[in-house]
Amino acid sequence: MAKVESFTLDHTKVKAPYVRLITVENGAKGDKISNYDLRLVQPNQNAIPTAGLHTIEHLLAGLLRDRLDGVIDCSPFGCRTGFHLITWGEHSTEEVAKALKSSLEEIADKIEWKDVQGTDKYSCGNYRDHSLFSAKEWSKAILEKGISSDPFNRQVV
């Protein structure tokens, strides 16, 4: 079985919240796809409850597309500590961290329930498992710690 880079990362040495470039894959036709680790809480010390994480996921899907070119997908980690962000091309971790910070600020301060996409049985596979209250509270807590553009040395944007 192929080694997965994310599973070789020493999760005891990182300092969340942070943005980390995991890899840039080069396609046969010269295209680039980048994978970022958007780590919101410290691994093995905390995890965002599923309802809040689910709502943050639905919101980041749109908010990050508004702030960064080439967003393909933003999907939660199974460990509930953050997200993979997949993009066409490559952005600096500082640029991604600023987009994430701005998105979380919007979630914390401006978003209302009517703004959350995909919250009915037609548009979500588990539409009952959402919490805007939790999403807002976790966004505030993450922002209080500051988002770093480096996983090991705090470089808060």
Image (spheres, rainbow, N blue to C red):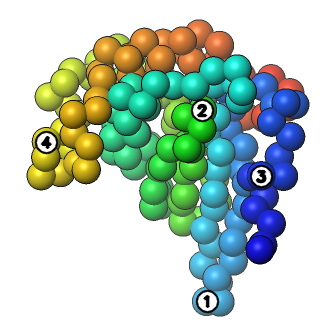
Q: CA distance from mark 4 to mark 1?
A: 39 Å
- The quadrant in which residue 37 appears is top right
Dot 3 or dot 1: first in sequence order is 3
Q: Quadrant of the C terminus?
A: top right
Dot 1 or dot 2: first in sequence order is 1
Q: CA distance from mark 3 to mark 4?
A: 34 Å
Residue that label 3 marks: 7
Residue that label 1 marks: 29
Q: Are marks 3 and 4 in contact (CB under 8 Å)?
A: no
Q: CA distance from mark 3 to mark 1?
A: 28 Å
- Secondary structure of the residue carrying numbered label 4: loop
Name which residue type carries label 4: Asp
Q: Is residue 66 above or below residue 82?
A: below
Residue that label 2 marks: 81
- The quadrant in which residue 88 appears is bottom right
Dot 3 or dot 4: first in sequence order is 3
Circle 2 Cα neighbour tier, 10 Å, few/some/many (<14 / 14–19 / ≥20): many
Q: CA distance from mark 4 to mark 2?
A: 25 Å
Residue 120 is marked as 4
